[in-house]
Image (spheres, helix red, strand yellow):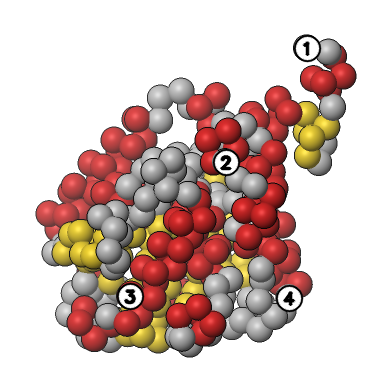
Amino acid sequence: MPQDVLTDKVFLDYTQEELDWQYDHSKRFPDTGLFNKERAEASAVAQTKVKGLLNVPYGDDEREVVDIFPAEGAQKAPVIIFMHGGAWTRGSKEGYSFPAAEFVPRGVAWVATEFTNVPQGTLSNQVRQNRDAVAWVYNNADTYGWERDKIYIAGHSSGGHMCGMSLVTDWEKLYGLPKDLIKGAIAISGMYDLEAVYLSYRNTYLGLSEEDWRENSPILHIPEHCSTPLLIGCSEHDTAEFHRQPGTFLKAWQAAGHKGEYIELMDRHHFTGSMCYGEPDHPLFQKICDMIGI
């Protein structure tokens, strides 16, 4: 391969090899199964502590289901809708029951969404599925005891991207629901400008067109008016791109006049950051409680 091809900049100041490294976690963590196992074990323990309703359909596809953990002793409770990560290709809601063990006793319902991974589906379809799940939570508030005016969304990694896309959704136009139905959003280690993803090795499996990445980049669809507060950030030991992505999105969000705050999860890397959602002593958990008002 010619030397100039190896040194050409393809995005910002990155060569192709450098950009690929920024988005390829396997280069730094060859065995991510260890972290998946930790989440799975914590989630299994959580399901013995709090009552859950598993695989409740929110749509017609077999993957369009949610796990629901209703709030203890509370009607009209706040509800957090969590969107899992996995590079859009893997991961599942089963590994994200663990925060319910802490939120449910505090009077907050926890809902974890499932959706169709790539390549069985597309990234655009995942966005639609998570939007459908949020709309379903709103429309089924009376059935499960949460408050329609207390819906919060959260996500990690590619789930952070899904959270970002739900945040910028025109709920009134697409679903006939209130524009401000989301009362707060928490997005950790997500991607909000998909141009970099489109130009990286990840597009070999995502198959995004230029139209796709533009349509699915939250930073390009920030609404003019929005009252939803945003808590956004990444892990201390995430790569530079996973620091840039939330920082750039937050600046754009605030520049539009919206409320937002940055958080860095100290002493964590990409695969341990999500555990902070279930750690009551961690600043992330505490800031979520402050946002909800509990």
Instruction: Return the residue at label 2.
Output: 207
Quarter of image, res 4: top right
- Image position, residue 261 (x, y; %): 62, 67
Give the residue at x 48% y 60%: 127
Give the residue at x 79% y 35%: 10
Q: CA distance from mark 3 to mark 1?
A: 52 Å
Instruction: Return the residue at label 4.
Output: 256
Which badge, 4 or 2, is on the more N-terminal residue? Answer: 2
Quarter of image, res 18: top right
Give the residue at x 54% y 41%: 206
Secondary structure under badge 2?
loop
* Badge count: 4
Instruction: Return the residue at label 1.
Output: 1
Q: Amino acid at mark 1?
A: Met
Q: Amino acid at mark 3?
A: Val
Which badge, 3 or 1, is on the more N-terminal residue? Answer: 1
- Image position, residue 166 (x, y; %): 51, 68
Q: CA distance from mark 4 to mark 2?
A: 31 Å
- Image position, residue 50 (x, y; %): 16, 62
Which badge, 2 or 3, is on the more N-terminal residue? Answer: 3
Q: CA distance from mark 3 to mark 4?
A: 28 Å
